[in-house]
Image (cartoon, rainbow, N blue to C red):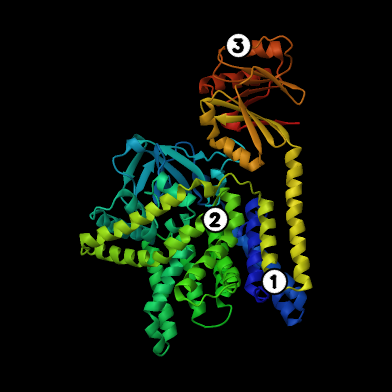
Amino acid sequence: MKKLLTYPPFHFLLCVIVGITLQFYTQIWQFNFLYLGYFLLSFIAILYFLKRLQKRKIFSLVSLFLFVFIGVSATYIHNPKNYVNYYEHQLTDGSYSILTIQKVLKPGNYYTKYVAKVSQVDSTTTTGYILLNIQKDSTKTSLAVGNRIFIKTSFKELIPPLNPHQFDYKQYLAKQYIYHQLFLSEHEFKQLNNASFSIINLSASIREKIQNSLNQHRFTDDEFAVINALLLGQRQEISKELLESYTNAGAIHILAISGLHIGILLLLLSYLFKLLERLPYGMILKTVCIVILLWSFAFIAGLSASVVRAVTMFTFVAIGLSFKRSKVIEYSLISSMLFLLLIKPMFLFDVGFQLSYLAVFGIVWVQPLLYDLWKPKLRFLNKGWQLFTVSIAAQAGILPISLYYFHQFPGLFILSNLIIIPFLSAILFGGIVIVLLATFNILPQFIADIYGFVISLMNYFVGWVSHQEDFLLKEISMSFWAMLAWYVFTIFFFQVWIRKTSKSIVFFLTSILLLQGVYFYEKYQRVNKNEFIVFHKSRHSIYGKRNGGELHIFSSINDSILQQEKLLQSYRIGEHILSKNIDSIFNVTSFNNKQVLVIDSLGVYQIKGIRKPIVILQNSPKINLNRLITTLKPQQIIADGSNYKSYINRWKETCNKQKTPFWYTGQNGAYIFKE
């Protein structure tokens, strides 16, 4: 760790991360590319003169600022919105567009989903991407990568989450530079000839040929879905139940081509090409062969973001290992991370990117410490102990961020990894052989049956582990600041483990105080927070009265169904709610000295003692809103998701005329009022 802190690319990496974060969240750089060039040249000129004058400290400081600015500029340059030919800048009323399919996503219940490039608006060649949704029952065949369609429909902005702590799909797509979406049926688009040659299209066509060849060998749906994910990087066919089983068993990383798979391939290829080391320049030749084969695998897997990240990471590792120097893996990881962020700055916000690097850093730094605790003499015990310590080290690297994103911990993750990972090398190698034989139509059926049986066996074992629900810890609250505090604690804990100096002990104790401080502050905030929430739920009504760590839920939905309601689960986890109770919907209640009146389909509102209330309209009551406003003089009128859209539009117009505040949860999101 100490040597790593003196490694210049590590400092540059931190500065680039600061620059990317700064530009993404604040848009601090709003000028054109000419000014961007001037600034970069100015920094370089200043560095040149400082080096000539031997001002080392100032030179170092300016160098760090330069890399912060490089992070800012990389983010600005890669954002298609900053270019004149971005499709949104070319749209007018009545514009037509040509879309090119770039990626096939996992389908929903009613729509097939794609990432599409807006290749042309009217007669102008454009750039930029959208989320494309096409009704499932409206097309006979799905679109494929490279297909082009003609449309005259206008794009719609992605909507933010309508309830607190729900997954923000709009921000998730914004980090991929996707800001609009389309919903189409068959009569709203026309399919054109395919796009001209591209690497992505060629990759998709080869992959489709492989899939068609595999389909001839009677694999079950789950077997084919896992083979598709493991070897071709395509997870669209995995069923919801199978995906949930792998998630709950702590084995989800097996289904996504990641650092684990590419690392195993690197080891296999290193072993296969070991004889080349005996030749003149053999190490260079070996490295070139390995890198070419790794990128060939990435090409067949569709060059998806996760595959490109993993292959880039291990390309740097393979090159670094060829030099046979100490700390080469750590330096290679830092260099690959810096390289990736300069090319694709938005990788920084990708959960897969974060998990991959944290897991690998955990293995590199923590596993040797754990392994030194016990060195069994028996070979099979030694291998088992190595695998056990690797699993623990990887989990130490990703645990805080996993809890922050997913809020659950699979207690049997060690069992899953101990059983599956030793066989994963054989499964991957065997799978590659299966793919090659199937592609050339020389795969014997009995070999396909054996391989399918092995995949089914793995699925069965994962399913069994996932059903041990007593070992699956769910709904764990973890805030962003608590996650950072846990990482600070983890780093200094292992620093003390490595070297027990007074300095490391002071830092470790300080990290404990920091962790305690974060939790004390969050508890104080939680205990003193009181609010009333009108959640948005289509065709239903859900309200919540929160008092500290307790949530009182009011709804007409059945209690057993309400217990599984995701919007309430997200709120409970995000706000660390310790207890809840459920009741039927009230007619009148009070909160923070304000009266809250709920008017349902009966339309009753003339209740004695009600004056200037907050009015909630539910189940489309047939009322004269003008008369209600005149009678009650409400402070606020709220319409929840149980009302008809036609009623919403009429009420909104009435409130505008009467100058009464109106809030529709389906458009404005959940309504929250606090003490």
- Identify which residue, 315 or 103, lies in the foreground: 315
Mark 1 vs mark 3, CA separation in Å: 68 Å
Q: Amino acid at mark 2?
A: Asp
**Which residue is rendered at x = 29% and y = 63% of the image?**
435
Q: Report the mark closest to the observer, 1 or 3.
A: 3
Q: How many other residues sit within 10 Å of disc 3, few (<14), some (14-19) or many (≥20)?
A: few
From the image, state whether disc 2 or disc 3 is nearer to you.
2
Q: Is residue 149 left or right of residue 643?
A: left
Query: Is residue 180 depicted above or below 593 in this figure?
Result: below
Q: Residue at x 41, y 81 (%)?
A: 286
Residue 381 in the image: x percent, y percent? 48, 71
Q: Which mark is residue 409?
A: none
Type of the residue with mark 3: Asn
Mark 1 burial class by Cα count in 10 Å: few <14, some 14-19, many 20+: some
Q: Which residue is mark 3?
A: 624
CA gap between label 2 and label 1 equals: 27 Å
Judged from the image, the secondary structure of the residue bearing numbered disc 2 is loop
Residue 63 is marked as: 1
Q: Is residue 346 left or right of residue 109?
A: right
Measure how far apart labels 2 and 3 are at the Cα level. Answer: 50 Å
Q: Of callouts 2 and 1, which one flags the residue occurring earlier in the amino acid sequence? A: 1
**The N terminus lies in quadrant:** bottom right
Q: Neighbour class for label 2 at 10 Å: few (<14), some, many (≥20)?
A: some
The nearer-to-camera label among 2 and 1 is 2
Specify which label sits upstream in the sequence, 1 or 3.
Answer: 1
Compared to residue 109, the image places residue 144 above or below, namely below
State if disc 3 and disc 2 touch (CB < 8 Å).
Answer: no
Give the camera-side residue of 140 and 364.
364
